[in-house]
Image (cartoon, rainbow, N blue to C red):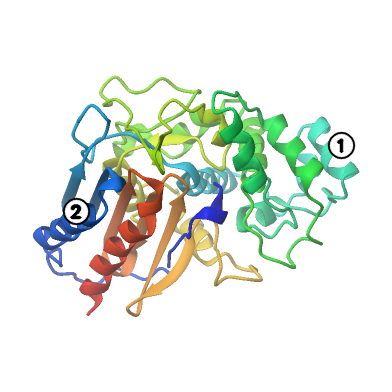
C-alpha cells in the first residue's frame, strides 16, 4: 500500500539447478545488518530470513518494542502491500478451481452499489476484468495517495471501511483511461479483488486466503488477517513499526485491510510462503504459477506480473513485493532462494532490501 513512498523490487521462473550452500554466509549478512543499525539507530531493528538449498538462515537485530523486547524472525509485523501477493495467489487458486474467469467483467462480480459508484464516475465495469485488476492495468488510479496518508495521520484511530476507500477513489480521482493501456499501481484495484474473493467464496477475506493458500498445511504459524482472525495462540506479540519517530503500533489497521494489505506475518512465515508458492505446494496445476509469473497479455510486463514485481539481479531473474511498513518478500526459483525482510522503521526499507538483493547477487556470481 501507499506505494508512492516506497519502491518495490522483484524478478521469471526457471527450473532450479543444483545450488551450493548458502552464500554469502550468515556472518556476512549479520555484519551488514549490524553496520546498518550502527549507522542508523533510528531504524530500531532489522529482521531477515533466507531459505536456500534446504537450509534456513534467520538474522534479526534490534528491538521489536520500545520496552527493549528483542526482535526475532518470529516477531509478527504488518506487511502492508506484501499482502497483494497473497490476494493475487488466492484469486488464481479460485481461477484454477473454475470459480472465476480472469477475463470476466467486474460488473458481474462486484456488489451493485460498487458498480453504480464506479460507473457513475466513468469507470466502465463492463470491460474492466479481474485480470486487469490483478495486473494494475484497469485504468483505475490509486486512492491510497498522499491525500489519503494525510487523512490517516489526522486520525490514526479511525475505522476505515471498504466503502470509504472506494468513495475516496471517485471523489478524488478520474479514470486514467481504458483498461490495458497504462500501468498504474492501484491499491484500490486490490481492494476490489478482496471484495470479489469474498463474494465468490462466501467467507471473509482472511478466512478465504488462509484456506485457499493452505496456511495450516505449509506451516504458517504466525500469519493472520488483521481484524478478521484472532492471532494464532503461538504467535508472539506484534512488533512496533515506526514511521519516522511515530510508533504506529496502535494505529487502526483498517487503513490498509481489504486486499491491498491486511496481513500480519513474520519473516519466517513469509520466506516459507514464497518457498511453498514456487515449489508446487500452493497451486494444484503448475500452469497457474506460470500464469502468475509471466502474466501473458500484460502490456507492461517489465513493471509487474500478477501479484509480483519482476527484476534481474546479477543476471538471475527473481520476483518480489514490498510493503509500506518496510517489509519485502523475494524469490529466485533459479537459485532456490526465498527470502523476507523488514526494517522496523519505514525509511530503512531500501537499505534492508539491498541486503536481500546482494545476498542473491552473490550467489549468482
Task: Count residues near mark 1 (Cα–Cα under 10 Å), then give few for <14, some for 14-19, many for 20+.
Answer: some
Query: Residue 112 placed where, x, y %?
Result: 83, 32
Which residue appears at 71% of the width and 66% of the height?
A: 182
Q: Nearer the viewer, residue 73 or 195?
A: 73
Horizontal side, residue 267 vs residue 177: left or right = left
Would you name the residue on which mark 2 appears?
A: 38
Query: Residue 145 placed where, x, y %?
Result: 64, 48
Query: Residue 7 placed where, x, y %?
Result: 48, 60
Horizontal side, residue 192 vs residue 350: left or right = right
- Tag 1 and tag 2, C-beta contact below 8 Å: no
Above or below for 20 versus 161: below
Q: Is residue 99 visible?
A: no
Instruction: Write down the quadrant of residue 162 in the picture.
Output: top right
Would you name the residue on which mark 1 appears?
A: 116
Which residue appears at 62% of the width and 57% of the height?
A: 185
Q: Nearer the viewer, residue 258 or 87?
A: 258
Q: Is residue 224 visible?
A: yes
Amino acid at each position: 500500500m501507499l506505494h508512492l513512498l516506497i519502491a518495490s523490487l522483484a524478478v521469471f521462473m526457471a527450473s532450479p539447478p543444483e545450488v551450493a550452500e548458502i552464500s554469502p554466509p550468515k556472518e556476512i549478512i549479520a555484519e551488514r545488518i549490524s553496520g546498518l543499525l550502527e549507522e542508523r539507530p533510528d531504524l530500531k531493528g532489522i529482521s531477515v530470513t533466507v531459505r536456500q538449498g534446504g537450509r534456513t538462515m534467520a538474522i534479526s537485530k534490534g528491538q521489536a518494542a520500545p520496552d527493549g523486547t528483542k526482535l526475532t524472525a518470529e516477531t509478527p509485523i504488518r506487511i502492508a502491500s506484501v499482502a497483494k501477493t497473497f490476494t493475487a495467489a488466492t484469486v488464481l487458486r479460485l481461477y484454477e478451481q473454475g470459480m472465476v474467469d480472469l477475463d470476466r467483467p467486474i460488473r458481474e462480480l462486484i456488489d451493485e452499489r460498487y458498480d453504480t459508484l464506479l460507473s457513475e464516475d466513468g469507470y466502465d465495469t463492463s470491460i474492466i476484468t479481474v485480470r486487469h485488476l490483478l495486473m494494475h492495468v484497469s485504468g483505475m488510479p490509486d486512492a491510497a495517495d498522499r491525500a489519503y496518508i494525510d487523512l490517516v495521520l489526522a486520525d490514526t484511530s479511525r475505522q476505515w471501511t471498504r466503502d470509504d476507500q472506494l468513495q475516496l477513489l471517485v471523489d478524488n480521482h478520474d479514470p486514467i483511461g481504458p483498461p490495458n493501456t497504462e500501468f498504474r499501481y492501484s491499491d484500490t484495484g486490490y481492494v476490489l479483488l478482496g471484495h470479489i474473493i469474498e463474494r465468490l467464496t462466501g467467507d471473509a477475506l482472511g478466512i478465504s486466503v488462509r484456506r485457499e493458500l493452505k496456511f495450516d498445511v505449509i506451516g504458517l504459524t504466525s500469519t493472520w488477517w488483521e481484524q478478521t482472525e484472532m492471532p494464532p495462540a503461538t504467535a508472539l506479540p506484534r512488533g512496533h513499526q515506526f514511521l519516522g519517530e511515530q510508533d504506529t503500533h496502535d494505529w487502526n489497521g483498517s487503513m490498509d485491510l481489504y486486499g491491498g494489505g491486511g496481513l500480519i506475518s513474520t519473516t519466517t512465515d513469509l520466506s516459507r510462503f514464497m518457498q511453498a508458492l514456487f515449489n508446487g505446494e500452493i497451486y494444484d496445476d503448475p500452469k497457474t504459477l506460470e500464469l502468475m509469473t509471466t502474466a501473458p497479455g500484460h502490456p507492461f510486463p517489465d513493471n509487474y506480473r500478477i501479484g509480483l514485481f519482476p527484476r534481474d539481479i546479477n543476471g538471475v531473474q527473481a520476483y518480489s513485493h514490498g510493503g509500506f511498513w518496510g517489509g519485502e518478500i523475494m524469490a529466485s526459483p533459479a537459485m532456490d532462494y526465498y527470502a523476507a525482510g523488514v526494517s522496523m522503521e519505514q525509511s530503512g526499507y531500501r537499505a534492508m532490501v539491498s541486503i536481500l538483493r546482494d545476498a542473491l547477487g552473490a550467489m549468482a556470481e
